[in-house]
Image (cartoon, rainbow, N blue to C red):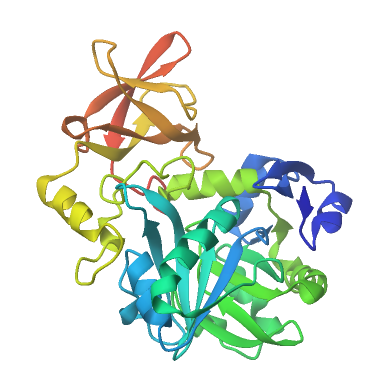
Amino acid sequence: MKDTALSKIHESLGAKMVPFAGFNMPVQYEGVTAEHLTVRESVGVFDVSHMGEFLVEGENALALIQKVTSNDASKLEIGSAQYSCFPNEDNGIVDDLICYRLKEETYLLVVNASNIEKDWNWISKYNEEFDANIRDLSENYSLLAIQGPKAVEAMQSLTSEDLSAIGFYTFKITDFAGYDGIIVSATGYTGSGGFEIYCNNDVVADIWKKVFEAGADFGIKPIGLAARDTLRLEMGYCLYGNDIDDTTSPIEAGLSWITKFSKDFVNAEALAKEKEHKPERRLVAFELDERGIPRQGYDIVDGNGKVIGNVTSGTMSPCLQKGIGMGYVPRIFSKSGTQIHIQVRKKAIPATIVKLPFYKG
């Protein structure tokens, strides 16, 4: 089990630590609901240093990225970022990722912790054709997600950069907390605004300390992975391994918006056909009409009790105070307003298909 550079700090703060993607990670501190509401209402800090970072450089860097990712990275300007995925050759997804354009021919790919080795092997396989310079920096970098509506105000004293001027899915390489060359990115996984801070492992403990000093008057708190999950689910953001995986296509997962057929990429032809003919099943969002908590793996059934799908993610929404979830169902059940049922133990609880996000802010 690997530690992040902050694991001992989490333990000293009383965090409940759990194994996650091969790392010893904080799942919660004071409780999921309290931490969730901290991020929605003020500002919270996640240690997500377990994420993977690949640097792709050279004259063929863009060509390689265009081949292995679904989105159109040629649209990226220096200082901007893009959500994308790695399609596999069988209508599934190797992983989802964020692509940053650091320089003219330099890109940073940020991937999920559980898929670092798989993703590296996937990119390396296709790089045999392009011979770009690729490096796995995952062991060297730490990542803090400072999220919430007060993040800009709370962190402004730590940098000379105007944080309010960093637009969504753009970033600056700037000074932060006394260090130069820090990536300050207006990205996140919560839907409540804020930043993600990329830095070297040897300075992250000091940056963590200064972040909490700067945010003290704004109610800043450390937040665990459990609240990260409820926050992303309220926004309807996919989680790899739950809502998307090697067997789910980006089209049926509702990710057509990051699947650009203006270029050639892995499995593009098959995915274009699937989009044209419409997938047989769709990833949908639902809210329970009665009390109950949907959990991953629970059956989704029709009015006659026939199993039509299963829940991929589910929880009791701290903001909506009702059960919410996502899952795959046949296309005929995917329209907003459609009634389905979630099998919670022996009871089929009625639910309604809704449009995302669940949390409107």
* Left or right placement of residue 43 versus residue 64 in this view: right
Residue beneath the point at 49% across and 25% down:
293
| Name of the residue lying farthest toward the right | 12
* Left or right placement of residue 133 versus residue 332 in this view: right
Q: Position of residue 299 (x, y in %)?
A: 39, 21
- Up-down relation of residue 350 to residue 324 (above or below): above
Q: Position of residue 69 (x, y in %)?
A: 36, 65
Q: Quadrant of residue 327?
A: top left
Is residue 324 something that shows in the picture?
Answer: no
- Up-down relation of residue 81 to residue 342 (above or below): below
* Left or right placement of residue 229 versus residue 306 in this view: right
Residue beneath the point at 56% across and 71% down:
54
Q: Quadrant of residue 205?
A: bottom right
Front in this rendered view, residue 122 or 237: 122
| Name of the residue lying farthest toward the front | 128
Quadrant placement of the C terminus: bottom left
Residue beneath the point at 45% across and 21% down:
291
Q: Position of residue 295 (x, y in %)?
A: 49, 28
Front in this rendered view, residue 295 or 13: 295
Residue beneath the point at 37% across and 32% down:
287
Front in this rendered view, residue 262 or 197: 262
- Up-down relation of residue 136 to residue 352 (above or below): below
Is residue 182 something that shows in the picture?
Answer: yes
* Left or right placement of residue 13 versus residue 24 in this view: right
Q: What number of labels is visible?
A: 0
| Name of the residue lying farthest toward the left | 277
Q: Position of residue 94 (x, y in %)?
A: 43, 52
